[in-house]
Amino acid sequence: MYRLARILAAALLATLPVAAASSWPDDPQAEMDVRLHPDDGRLEGRLTLQLPDEGPFSLAVGPGYRIDEVALDAGSAEKLGQRGVILRPGEATEARLRWSGEPGEESRGAHLRPEGAWLAAEAGWYPRPAERRTGYRLNVTVPEPLQVVAEGTRVDERISDGLRRVEFRHPAPARGITLFAGEWEQRSRSVRHGTVHTFLPEHLAEHHDLYLEKTGAYLDEYSDWIGPPPHETYSVVAAPYPVGLAFAGFTALGEQVIPLPFIPETSLPHEVVHNWWGRGVYTDYDEGNWNEALTYYMGDYHQAAQRDTEQAQRLRGDWLRSQAALPDAADYPLSEFRHNRGTVDEIIGYQRGAQLFHTLRRSLGEAAFDQAVRRFYARHAHQEASWSDLETAFAGAAEDEGADAETVPALFEWFLSATRAPDLELDERTLEVAHEGDDRFRIRVDIAWDEDGYPVSVPVVLKGEDGRLDERDIRLQPGERTRIEFTSETAPRYLQADPDHHLYRQLALGEGVSILRDTLLAESVTLVASWDGLEAAAERALRGEVEPGAPDRDRPLLIVGPREAVSEHLEAIKACVTDRIRPVDRSPVAWASTTGGGQPLIALAAEDAEEAREALQRLARYGRHSYVGFGSGHDAETGLYNPADRHGLRLPLADQLDAD
């Protein structure tokens, strides 16, 4: 029923303009004709620019290119060397330019070769406006064996005299134009909200159908949820690098990752959602980067929740364990996140940001959350937007849906500025458990929330032998302490607060488990290795400094060697007894533990130095796990240790009942 309501709401939204479309004709409009000469590594192009007013307009091309001709119907043009020009129209008028050249460097994002091209907008392969954005129509001509994909809606394609000519349109003000060309097979499929395309090399042809099916399903799903897609087509393009990149109207996925079975379920929806967030609504970076958090929450997390509620629960637990592993010196406020440069930025910009949206959804309800994202998109499509604009959208939606609108600014302020996660406490000193006869049980306990926290709704669960007996949400303000009471007709076994990790908080004493990330993020790690030459691989895997040395129970450690040597070192530093043994029967295998001095460690058992080096090269991607047994390629066996049966937020009740 809720799914139907979402579709009907989206259909109503589709009758509204995606953004202030009437403003687009007031922005400059460009028409470009570009010819790629891959054999020579060069291109040439013509630009016709409609200027709607008399303000100066600057354009420039990147290194390796030059502006060859400039003409303006009314006004003047000032050339700035070979690469720049300032247009000064005397009235609304038309300007015409010719440019040519080749990429300034042979690197990712700037190459033009016989087998294909990658021309990033930032490389300046076309005359880019210095300040004001333009809409455009782009015609690209390439030799027929090549296919071409560029940002915007794919409109038309024609082949004549051995040349392929493809047209793309983006009438709204655009952030830039990135272009790919390659020797791909093209397949297409129509879906409810447009047309999806796949561009894959011949050796990946078996993946066309799956990617068309999944991409079309995601395009329709998120169009129903957020609003009409910003472009009428969406493409999946194979890139010769191990990347996952989002552009307006397409994504580039590495040829190496496309065959991996988990990519259509994880990376693909993430990139599709970026078609709305970041590429549909642009990011005002002055207030920070909101689009990665919202994309991660509505893409990665939402799809995990759709597959399995336990997957979503594990993901939320990963967020808390990762935050707990983050050193204080590396932490910073969410408002300062701009770009993903590594694990620390993922923990803050993606995970903590996603937790903000999860908290908003739980606090306001699904109806208000959905209305907020639809409202935000409709108001800001093809325009820059900030965290403040998101806050405005959520506050308005909360008010319309009768939710607690006053909570919205408090949540945004806290999540954007805080670093330390708050503490939640079940005060066992106040626990009262009584069997009152006639199979009636009563449980009372105080619950307290950190004074430096945010407005929160705490799930508290009473559990029996066969599952949950009762569950309720306890709303708390920062610094609030209250008594909660449960009654049950079945003997309870446990009382637990936030068992499914819905809250952004500190892990309670005994609730956390060792994970590889505890050591991977340490400021400094001692490498204890049975073989020489592993320092470089260890430095790439770990965030902090790596210093070769002897086992030290008072230092974070990375212990690498044959199984017997690793065991001896773990014994010498009095590592946690339960975590000294190999967790899986694979080689190599790495697992997390702690020293006798309470410092994090990773033990890596391998047959030889080369096997250890290969494992270290892959280690960082498994940081959220307690252990990983490596296999060939991307194959791996991973897992988490079980938390303690009793911890600060899980109180056993059986002993009190027996005493009673």
Image (cartoon, rainbow, N blue to C red):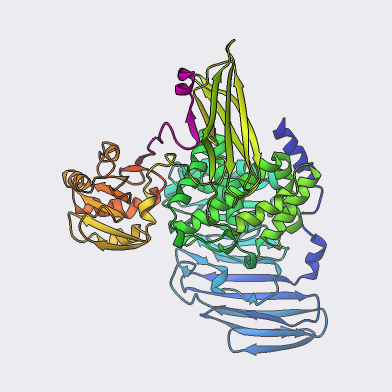
Q: Nearer the viewer, residue 106 or 575?
A: 575
Location of residue 6 (image quadrant):
top right
- Whether residue 655 is in magenta: the answer is yes
- Whether residue 419 is in magenta: the answer is no
Residue at x-position 29% and y-position 56%: 555
Location of residue 94 (image quadrant):
bottom right
Number of numbered discs visible in the structure rendering: 0
Q: Position of residue 245 (x, y in %)?
A: 52, 57
Depicted 506 relative to depicted 338: above or below: above
Residue at x-position 35% and y-position 58%: 542
Q: Nearer the viewer, residue 14 or 594?
A: 594
In the rendered image, the quadrant that contains the N terminus is top right
Residue at x-position 42% and y-position 39%: 510
In this picture, residue 608 sits left or right of residue 294: left
Q: Position of residue 425 (x, y in %)?
A: 53, 40
Q: Position of residue 616 (x, y in %)?
A: 30, 53
Can residue 593 be seen in this snapshot?
yes
Residue at x-position 52% and y-position 56%: 348
Q: Nearer the viewer, residue 42 or 67?
A: 67
Can residue 213 be seen in this snapshot?
no
Q: Position of residue 531 (x, y in %)?
A: 17, 56
Magenta span of residues: 641-660
